[in-house]
Image (cartoon, rainbow, N blue to C red):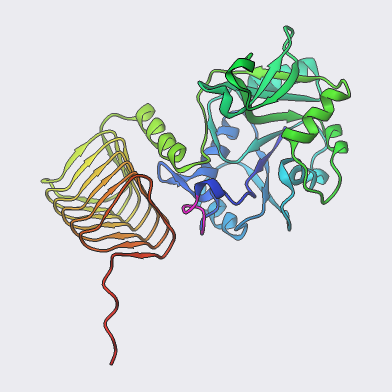
Amino acid sequence: MKAVILVGGKGTRLRPLTCKTPKAAIPILNRPALEHMLRYLEGHGIHDVILATGHLADSIDGILKSIQIDIRTLPVLETMPLGTAGAVKNASRYLDDAFVVLNGDIVTGIDLSEMARLHRQVRPRVTMALTPVDNPTMYGVVETTDCGLVKKFVEKPGWDRVTTNLINAGIYIIEPAVLDYVAESTMVMFEDYVFPRLLEQGEPVLAYPSDAYWIDVGTPEKYLKVNQDLLGQTQTGAVVQGEAVIDPGARLEGPVLIGPECVIAAGAHIRGPSVIGPQCRIAAGAAIEASVLWDNVTIGERSKVKTSIIASNCRVEEDCYLEQCVLGRGVTIGRGNSLDWGARIWPDSLVGCAPPASSH
């Protein structure tokens, strides 16, 4: 069975992290998000994967070169936004049997092998993975029949109309004939057009409910959470990837993951769950708590970073305080500045920095 991963979106909800970085490349535990998805598919015996690319598509090639994995990948570019169904239609020439479609911004433990077994047994047009959520009023919920078929899609129901807490998990097994509902080179969504049309035509759509781990990594808050969730599932102490220079006077409270070539000075304090990317420099007296730093980030002396995300090549100078902040690539926070309560700083910004000296 082949798989199609939808990685062409702009990731607007994740900005400023995705202004210069495609969603597929954002690091989760210091490895590209796409690598986690490919390893998930490899674990379920899928070795042929089509990547429906679009926004910042050139970056995908670099990601694939960095991943050592036994999977054949084929990027297929959409030259204009085509939606979830349109993007798969764009790759239809490579799909001649039932195939898997996955949204590119999810991390999950849903049992894809069992889902595929049920699909082969029942042979519906589509098998759709469903996942429970605490607040179904924020999503489109999926009502099912007693025999496990999808009955109805209800978009963001009020609490008085909630009949289920199951939502579309963004994983489908689809028969090629379903793509006949999608016109070529047209913006079409599976969720609000193709699947409702199938129900209108009486075509069977099988539900596959699962309470396995699932998260949509579509916002900075969810991105921070998935790093912390996976870190908590795999370790309790501090783990260093490769070689790093960590002064004996630094304090590390796990779970903490530290990338290669980092330098952590005496008196620095890193408290988990935190991920420190490669080539970061944490100065004396700096404190990091429940945060994710990408590669080549510098945190100056006595600066404090809490529940924040800092993208590549950022510099936080001395005596700064950041809480619940998101910094895009290449941001510099000048000495003594404080940012909190959801501040999002766009790439290459200079915040509170002294102007460059005049050449005259």
Seen at 34% across and 58% down, the residue is: 296
Q: Is residue 343 left or right of residue 171?
A: left
Which sits in the foreground, 244 or 157? 157
Seen at 55% across and 44% down, the residue is: 34
Highlighted range, magenta? 15-19
Quadrant of the image occupied by residue 84:
top right
The percent position of residue 130, horizontal first and vertical second, equals: 63, 22
The percent position of residue 322, horizontal first and vertical second, equals: 28, 49
Asked whether 271 falls inside the magenta stretch, the response is no
Quadrant of the image occupied by residue 313:
bottom left
Seen at 54% across and 54% down, the residue is: 65
Dominant secondary structure, magenta: loop
Say which quadrant the N terminus sits in. Answer: top right
Asked whether 17 falls inside the magenta stretch, the response is yes
The percent position of residue 77, horizontal first and vertical second, equals: 71, 55
Residue at the outermost top position: 146
Residue at the outermost bottom position: 360
Q: Is residue 168 left or right of residue 218?
A: right
Seen at 51% across and 59% down, the residue is: 20
Q: In this view, does 295 lie to the left or right of 77?
A: left
